[in-house]
Image (cartoon, rainbow, N blue to C red):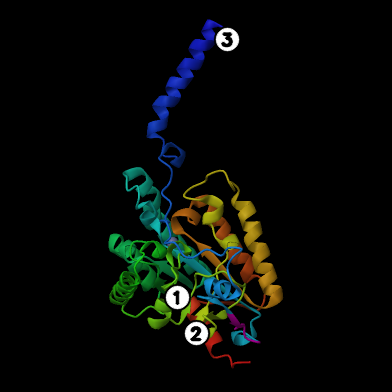
Amino acid sequence: MNRSRRRLTCAAALVLIGWLPGCSSPRAQPAPASPQQPAPSVPPITIDSTEEQIRQAVGTARFGRKLTPTAWPNGARVAVCVTFDVDNELLQRANPLPVPLSVGEYGATTAVPRILDLLDRQQVPATFFMPAMGIMLHPEMLSSILARQRHEVGVHGWIHEFWPGIGDAAKEERMLAKDIDYLTKATGRRPVGVRAPSSGFSPQTFDLIRKAGFLYDSSLLAADEPYEIVSNGQPSGVIELPIAEVSNDYVYYGETANGAMPSPDAVFQIYKAEFDLAYQERTMFILTQHPHVGGRRSRIVNLDRLITYIKSKPGVWFATMEQVANFVKQQPRS
Ligand SMILES: [Zn+2]
């Protein structure tokens, strides 16, 4: 490298150094906080485990009878639920500094209003899972959702805490009661559905959900269609409307574009293929989006495109999760 080239390289490096601290890219920030805390230790399944120990280890919340009806309302062949986990700033609990917080704040300032406009235009209902303290930070977000009179609000923790990390069944029970109370007061009605923050079920969580009287849960991933949760061998009466990582925006984009899946068009193709098979199988399609992630400009146009595509098919029932759960609950036991 000659001297003049070296000078140029140094200048470029200085510009870069000067630029990086002010860069809003999350790459310039400390590693994004994982919403998860260490889970309490549960006995692992090992080569020495007995059959009974293995049965017990997997038995807390299992796939039970399928609840897909022979026909959806009005003869529809598929049910579609558009759902949002409104996590916003609360994914930055471990690192609540202004810049990473602002990445989540975007969900309230810009993405939720944009999503609500899209849902209005498409005349589609949705289910919003909202941490209580997210509502406290942005009460206008909740009132604009409720003003549409078409959407459902479900439980998603207090501060988006990771339930297995609480490590105390009584405290976990009190937290869940607090979540339910807060949403009941804020929305004017008791929530009937729950989605565990960061898909975190402790060994007690399912029992607490059942005891709290929820109509449905939407945290598990054991099937592509509604089912009744079986707990320790017993049908629980709680309906599972299962999510799928493949139909979640977060797995592709992370907090913001991280290079793992830079093309919203590719993500659209995956969602479309997921819907197409649900349509063929006459079951249901659940989409899980995070406003501050999927509500970005280049991504939400593809959500609009996806809904337009789904609506182009005959026999689609767009519904809230509560509507789907109430409908499948009426199905006779086979
Ligand atoms: Zn969440």
- Report helix, strand or loop for mark 1: helix
Residue 248 sits in quarter: bottom right
Residue 100, percent from left and from top: 38, 46
Left or right, residue 107 beside residue 122? left
Q: Earlier in the sequence, mark 2 or mark 1?
A: 1
Query: Where's ligand 1: which quadrant?
Result: bottom left
Which of the two discs, 3 and 2, labels the residue nearer the N terminus? 3
**Looking at the image, which residue is at 42% across and 72% down?**
205
Q: How far across and down, in percent of the image, does residue 181 sit?
A: 29, 76
**Circle 2 sits in a helix, a strand or a loop, which is it?**
strand
Q: Are marks 2 and 1 in contact (CB under 8 Å)?
A: yes
Percent position of residue 27, x then y: 46, 39
Q: Badge 3 local density, few (<14 within 10 Å), some, or many (20+)?
A: few
Q: Amino acid at mark 1?
A: Phe
Of discs 3 and 1, which sits in the foreground? 1
* Mark 3 and mark 1 residues within 8 Å of each other at the beta carbon: no
Q: Secondary structure at mark 3?
A: loop
Q: CA distance from mark 3 to mark 1?
A: 64 Å
**Could you tell me the amino acid type at mark 3?**
Met
Residue named by callout 2: 236
Left or right? Give the position of 54 relative to 181. Answer: right
- Say which mark, if any, is on residue 1: 3
Image check: 162 left or right of 283? Answer: left
- Up the image or down, 6 lies above or below 202; here it is above
In percent of the image, x 36 and y 54: which residue is there? Answer: 89
Residue wearing tag 1: 206
Inter-mark Cα distance, 3 to 2: 72 Å
Residue 232, image x, y percentages: 52, 80
How crowded is the residue under tag 2: few (<14 C-alpha within 10 Å), some, or many (20+)?
A: some
Q: Which residues are magenta?
A: 64-70
Task: Tell me, yes or no, if residue 117 can be seen here.
Answer: no
Q: In the displayed structure, would residue 315 be above or below residue 276?
A: below
